[in-house]
Image: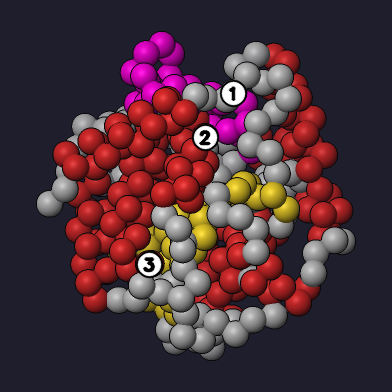
Amino acid sequence: MSIYRNVVWFMKGFQEYTKSGYEAAAKHFTPADLDVNLSGRSFMITGANSGIGKSTALEIANRGGTVHMVCRNKGRAEAAKDEIVEHSKNQNVHVHIVDMSSARQVWEFAQNFSQNNSLHVLINNAGCMVNQRELTEEGVEKNFATNTLGTYILTTVLLPALKKAEDPRVVTVSSGGMLTQKLNVDDLQFEKGTFDGTMAYAQNKVKERQQVILTERWASQHEGIHFSSMHPGWADTPAVQLSMPDFHAKMKNKLRTEAMGADTTVWLAVSAAAAKHPSGLFFQDRKAVATHLPLAFSRSSPQEEERLQATLEQFANKFKP
């Protein structure tokens, strides 16, 4: 990444991604957008036991929606569920224990779920940022396995169930960090050069260039489902505290709350206003925004983007039950 791109991105982030950036944007929100009754609608949220995922789950439960929490740790998931049920008085909150870094687990869960449940909205929120290169038991680099491959498999397998629903949507939580990244199909698992966890996160997370590209491609391929990706801003979440301690220490007084970070996710998942936008766009604070910085040279060719999807399909089929 060039110094220019980093400086431009950080200046943009300091102005827009912080708590003050949210407060400035919120002055233009339409509060009635979230005044909805979600009874009878089913929502799946990955990584729902903490941070933005948990805040999203609570907001949906508060509005009467059925919530399916997809989490890795049973103890933390059950504790979060109990808290959500207590605050929302909504009993329709369910926990599913799935390790999103395990392609086989994701396959099996998604297939079983789609056979036995209805689904209106999928929210791809789970992610990780491992700062040392680490392989899963299946031999896949852990950031890529969790943030891209797991999300790809879950979304792809659940598409038929979503197509049966009224007003189906797929929302993917991404990150402004991907604005500095160009797709590199030739090194999806960061096998070349020095491993950089922060760069890997920007490249392939929910918060990432690969998922933004997948959102755009899915939108063009699956008419009838509304796809979107979004940046929550810089929020004070357990994941940020753990994976980016220096950044958190320097910025903690300026970081958004978890609810602020979740606001656009909830808006995209439940509001009629969000569905009026074309499918496939990238959002920040309830507005569609550009996916590339000026002069950042981060654009990829249609051929590279097609190759990304083909490569993920090959990966996914390798682990299909």
Q: Is residue 318 left or right of residue 148?
A: left
Residue positioned most to the left = 321
Which comes sooner in the sequence, label 1 or label 2? 2
Q: Visible in this render: residue 81? A: no
Q: What separation in Å lies between label 1 and label 2 (alpha carbons)?
A: 9 Å
Judged by depth in the image, the label closer to the viewer, 1 or 3, is 3
* Residue under the image location 60 percent in, 48 percent down: 281
Amino acid, disc 3: Lys
Residue under label 3: 163
Q: What separation in Å lies between label 1 and label 3 (alpha carbons)?
A: 33 Å
* Residue under the image location 68 percent in, 38 percent down: 290
In front of the other: 245 or 200:
200
Decide: marks 1, 3 in contact (CB < 8 A)? no
Residue under label 2: 209
Amino acid, disc 2: Arg
Q: Secondary structure at mark 3?
A: helix
Q: Secondary structure at mark 1?
A: loop
Q: Secondary structure at mark 2?
A: helix
Which comes sooner in the sequence, label 1 or label 3? 3
Residue under label 1: 298
Task: Provide the residue span drawn in magenta.
Answer: 176-202
The 10 Å Cα crowd at callout 1, few under 14, some 14 to 19, many 20 or more, is: some
Quadrant assignment, res 141: top left
